[in-house]
Image (cartoon, rainbow, N blue to C red):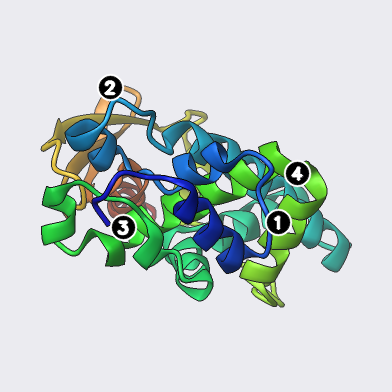
């Protein structure tokens, strides 16, 4: 969508999420992608609401996991939370609510199919969650998050991710903590090789990785370092 935002946007979002906004501007802002703000208006984008919604979502998922898995330790709970709030899951939440056709995009994003991009959908879902929280408080925000996530909850402890496994190995074997340094950033959103990251142990580079996000690049770098660690142990 590229037209100026107005009350219909709030009404459409209310119908999608089941919350009637007392402040329609919050609903409108939640649907306003940065590309739309930059190209078409001086109105704020949904980025600040996205930040708030991320915190609300983290609380909802943390409580759910805490109650459902009383035998899991902090590490398992943390890994499960990270697995649940990844971009793919949140984009799925946005699709289940029908947010794609509602998000307001700039012309460039419209032409490139931005309404179907996982990053845009995931961010929009978090922004909507933040808007619901500001407009109605924590209870409707929790209800929306739970409804969108459904029964998505791991039944067994998720495996340690590569970064955690590498840190445990370096602490045990080398008494050091690995560090990560971004060596390249193309600046192109949704570029699968946007970031290149090196993982260092002490002054030595042990691996490097590329990815669409810094987290993905760090994970790949850690995997390469673990491969080297396995060869070193052998």
Residue 234 at least partly seen? no
* N-term-proximal mark, 1 vs 2: 1
Dot 3: what SS? helix
- Find numbered disc 2 in the image and state the secondary structure of the residue it sits on: loop
Quickly name the residue at label 4.
Answer: 136
Which is nearer the N-term, disc 3 or disc 1? Answer: 1
Residue hosting label 2 = 203
Residue pointed to by mark 3? 227
Q: Nearer the viewer, mark 4 or mark 2?
A: 4
On the image, numbered disc 1 is attached to which residue?
Answer: 61
Using the image, determine if residue 99 lies above or below residue 151.
Answer: above
- Asked if the residue under mark 3 is in contact with the one under mark 2, i.e. CB atoms within 8 Å, the reply is no
Separation of marks 4 and 1 at Cα, in angstroms: 19 Å
* Label 2: few (<14), some (14–19) or many (≥20) C-alpha neighbours in 10 Å: few
> To which quarter of the image does residue 83 belong?
bottom right
Task: Give the mark, 4 or 2, whose residue is nearer the N terminus.
Answer: 4
Residue at x 29%, y 67% (from the top left corner): 116
Q: Which numbered disc flags the more N-terminal residue, 3 or 4? A: 4
Seen at 39% across and 54% down, the residue is 233
Q: Residues within 10 Å of mark 3 (few under 14, many from 20)?
A: some
Residue 60, horizontal then vertical, whole percent: 73, 53
Quarter of the rendering containing residue 56: top right
Query: Which residue is more in the foreground, 27 or 91?
Result: 27
State the SS at label 4: helix
């Amino acid at each position: 969508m590229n037209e100026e935002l107005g009350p219909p946007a709030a009404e459409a979002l209310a119908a999608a999420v089941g919350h009637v906004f007392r402040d329609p501007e919050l609903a409108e802002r939640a649907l306003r992608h940065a590309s739309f703000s930059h190209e078409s208006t001086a109105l704020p984008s949904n980025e600040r609401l996205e930040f708030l919604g991320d915190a609300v979502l983290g609380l909802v998922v943390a409580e759910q996991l805490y109650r459902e898995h009383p035998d899991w330790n902090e590490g398992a709970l943390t890994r499960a939370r990270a697995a649940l709030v990844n971009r793919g899951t949140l984009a799925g939440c946005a699709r289940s609510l029908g947010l794609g056709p509602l998000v307001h995009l700039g012309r460039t994003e419209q032409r490139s199919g931005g309404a179907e991009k996982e990053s845009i959908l995931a961010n929009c879902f978090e922004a909507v969650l933040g808007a619901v929280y500001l407009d109605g408080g924590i209870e409707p925000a929790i209800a929306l998050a739970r409804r969108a996530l459904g029964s998505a909850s791991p039944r067994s402890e998720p495996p340690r991710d590569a970064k955690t496994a590498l840190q445990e190995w370096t602490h045990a074997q080398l008494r050091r903590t690995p560090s990560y340094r971004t060596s390249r950033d193309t600046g192109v959103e949704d570029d699968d090789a946007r970031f290149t990251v090196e993982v260092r142990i002490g002054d030595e580079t042990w691996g490097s990785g590329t990815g669409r996000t810094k987290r993905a690049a760090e994970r790949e770098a850690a995997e390469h370092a673990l491969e080297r660690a396995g060869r070193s142990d052998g």
